[in-house]
Amino acid sequence: MELTYTIQRSPKRRRVTITVERDRSVIVHAPEDASDEQIHEVVESKRHWIYEKIVHPQKYHNLPHPPGKELVSGESILYLGRQYRIEIVKAGLADIQFTQRFLIPDIEAPRQAEALRTWYMNRAQEKIVPRVKQYARQLGVEVAEVKIVDSRYRWGSCTPKNNINLNWRLIKAPMFVIDYVIVHELAHLIEANHTPEFWNIVHAQAPTMDKAREWLKENGQLLEQVI
């Protein structure tokens, strides 16, 4: 099977590295002086790893026609797996409010988008971080720090220093999906690799694991949209 990839060269790079983005595209980061032949050799040596990442459940399927929404009254946006309507308030509102609908101040569109992103990140901090600590207690693992991050490539990650990083965009997903990603990362504190034991740990704590993985495949790209 032909493997397509994009090469990004940088004078600061010392070696060739490969990332598989959530949309399943393959990016090769290479030193400025690396030849195409050298890069091709590295890609071929990592072919099996690349295909494993491409089919990973945290990667999403491309939507044939990504939604073209705008922050206007009557439109709807995702929060915890449900769509809620937007109402643009022309006066008397300083910040976004949520009361089973989104009340958004009538300000310039870029500022509205930034305000919505900030609102999502704050909700992620409030709702996701405590669940990480709850599941950590259930699994009997020690977490050094929980961070809500803006990641281009991952829904979540576990660092060698026992930090758990979770993408703020997850707050748009249903709670069973959030719980799956949380448990998935915490399970790596027990078993580093995706072994049968690892998946048994995840399934025991997140019995709707398969449903969550399928949801991310089908809807992951929706989480990437501003609205």
Image: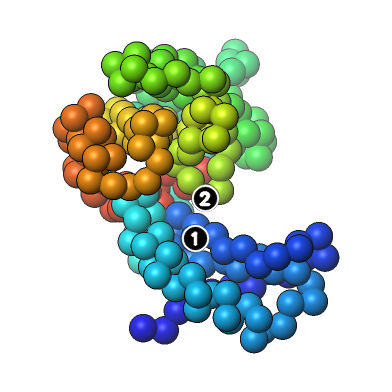
Q: Nearer the viewer, residue 135 or 219?
A: 135
Q: Which mark is residue 20?
A: 1
Given the current orientation, which residue lies at the most extreme right position? 11
Q: Is mark 1 on a helix, strand or loop?
A: strand
Residue 120 visible? The answer is no
Q: In the rendering, at what x and y percent does residue 143 appear?
A: 48, 20
| Mark 2 crowd level (few <14, some 14–19, many ≥20, 10 Å Cα) | some
Side (left or right) of 59 relative to 203: right
Q: Name the quarter where the N terminus is drawn.
A: bottom left
Q: How far apart are marks 1 and 2 (CA)?
A: 7 Å
Q: Are marks 1 and 2 in contact (CB under 8 Å)?
A: yes
Q: What residue is pinned by disc 2?
A: 153
- Tally of numbered discs: 2
Give the vertical position of 204 relative to 210 (above or below): above
Q: In this view, does 6 lie above or below 210?
A: below
- Element assignment for label 2: loop
Q: Does label 1 or label 2 sit earlier along the sequence?
A: 1
**Residue 147: image location, x then y, percent:** 55, 26
Q: Looking at numbered disc 1 in the image, what kind of residue is underneath it?
A: Val
Q: Residue at x 69, y 69 (%)?
A: 30
